Image (cartoon, grey):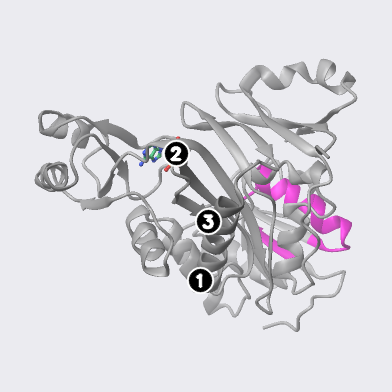
Amino acid sequence: MPDFPLPPGSTIGVLGGGQLGRMLALAAARLGFDVAILDPEPDAPAARVAAHAIVAAYDDPEGLKALADVSDVITFEFENVPAAALDRLAELGAAVAPDARALGIAQDRLAEKTFLNGAGAPTVGFAAVDSVADLRAALANLGAPLLLKTRRGGYDGKGQIWVHGAGGATTAWKALGGQPCVAETPADFRREVAVVAARGRSGEIALYPLTESHHEAGILRRARAPASATPRVLAEAERIVATILAALDYVGVIGVEMFERDDGKLLVNEFAPRVHNTGHWTLDGCEVDQFEQHIRAIAGWPLGPTEALAQVEMTNLLGEEANAWRKLAQEPETRLWLYGKGEARPGRKMGHVNRLTPLPR
Ligand code: AMP
């Protein structure tokens, strides 16, 4: 283990070279760190702004060794990094944060919900589904409809399907490829909210203000922050996030997505053990944004202030929407972030904009 805090000039390794890695690398550079990116793609967005780029599969032993050799601490920006990669890094003596346990729990929706309930964070009702018979039993026990989700690998609304009754069980099971699933009761939410927070190496925590998130076709479209909420909801969100961070003995930034019901009850949908799209507004809305905060946390630095300095609406630029950069660059209240990705495939996150207005007095 290195001595923390890591001094400037140290190198931060990142598994994954997408936009999250790119924004982490930019933040790390500002604090005087170098970044090494490991990604299977030669032209990864983060690799192009990093000091070291290792092009290798996530489970390639030589690539992982090269990353461990050059890095003082290693993190990840991609949630589907194989657990074996973190095990290998641990064998090599690398300091990895967040740790393999947090990643392993977040990668499996069943383990995640079981962990959350055990830690005192409420979720929707759920049941493990490993067969059509399990799905029928879940419908009998929990009622219909249920949202069937693959336990692993789902993202941006992929790998999930509503099941409206026992008659639809076989079709739904086959539609998801007959793989281990979890069936969830409907959240019946009024809105979706998220909290991005950080926990440092000495256990201190810092939460960004509550964010209201809007999804379309399973993909985050917009996030607004700070979201107004009753003191009771704010306190409960804080309690839930602090509980999760402590139960994981977590180091780094986490994104916790929640449903807010009409009665103000909060249910956790999932957490991401990394910087999060619902926290991109902090880039322009806070003194220390979520990317710098993550670097500070894993490097053993003190956490920075998280208050909002402006009201921010973040909008993701999907596919060809990023082609509007000329117009967006002319808007004085709009901060433009582009990820340097080549092909503008439909739905692909190419960038985002933060639109700032003064905080209400
Ligand atoms: P997820 O892949 O779990 O993040 O889900 C993607 C989106 O599907 C969420 O942001 C919600 O809009 C919706 N969703 C997920 N789980 C539920 C649920 N149990 N009930 C209702 N809507 C859900």
Relative depth, front residue between 81 and 273: 273
Residue bounds of the magenta highlight: 12-34
- Mark nearer the N terminus (1 vs 2): 1
What distance separates the C-alpha of mark 2 from that of mark 3?
43 Å
State the mark number for residue 285. Answer: none
Q: What residue type is labelled 2?
A: Asp
- Residue 200, horizontal then vertical, whole percent: 69, 72
Q: In which quarter of the image is the N terminus?
A: bottom right
**Residue labelled with disc 1:** 248
Q: Can residue 341 be seen in this view?
A: no
| Other residues around mark 2 within 10 Å, as few (<14) / some (14–19) / many (≥20) | few
Query: In the rendered structure, are the residues bearing label 3 and label 1 in contact, judged by CB atoms less than 8 Å apart?
Result: no
What distance separates the C-alpha of mark 3 from that of mark 1?
24 Å
Relative depth, front residue between 349 and 331: 331
- Residue 36, horizontal then vertical, whole percent: 72, 59
- Mark nearer the N terminus (3 vs 1): 3
Q: From the viewer's perspective, is the residue at label 2 or at label 3 nearer?
A: 2
Q: Is residue 184 above or below residue 319?
A: below
Determine the image quadrant of residue 204: bottom right
Q: Residue at x 61, y 44 (%)?
A: 229
State the mark number for residue 58. Answer: 3
Determine the image quadrant of residue 42: top right
Query: Is 156 positioned to the left or the right of 36 in the image?
Result: left
Q: Which amino acid does label 1 sit on?
A: Leu
Q: What residue type is labelled 3?
A: Tyr
Relative depth, front residue between 203 and 323: 203
- Residue 57, horizontal then vertical, whole percent: 53, 53
What distance separates the C-alpha of mark 1 from that of mark 2?
29 Å
**Residue labelled with disc 2:** 262
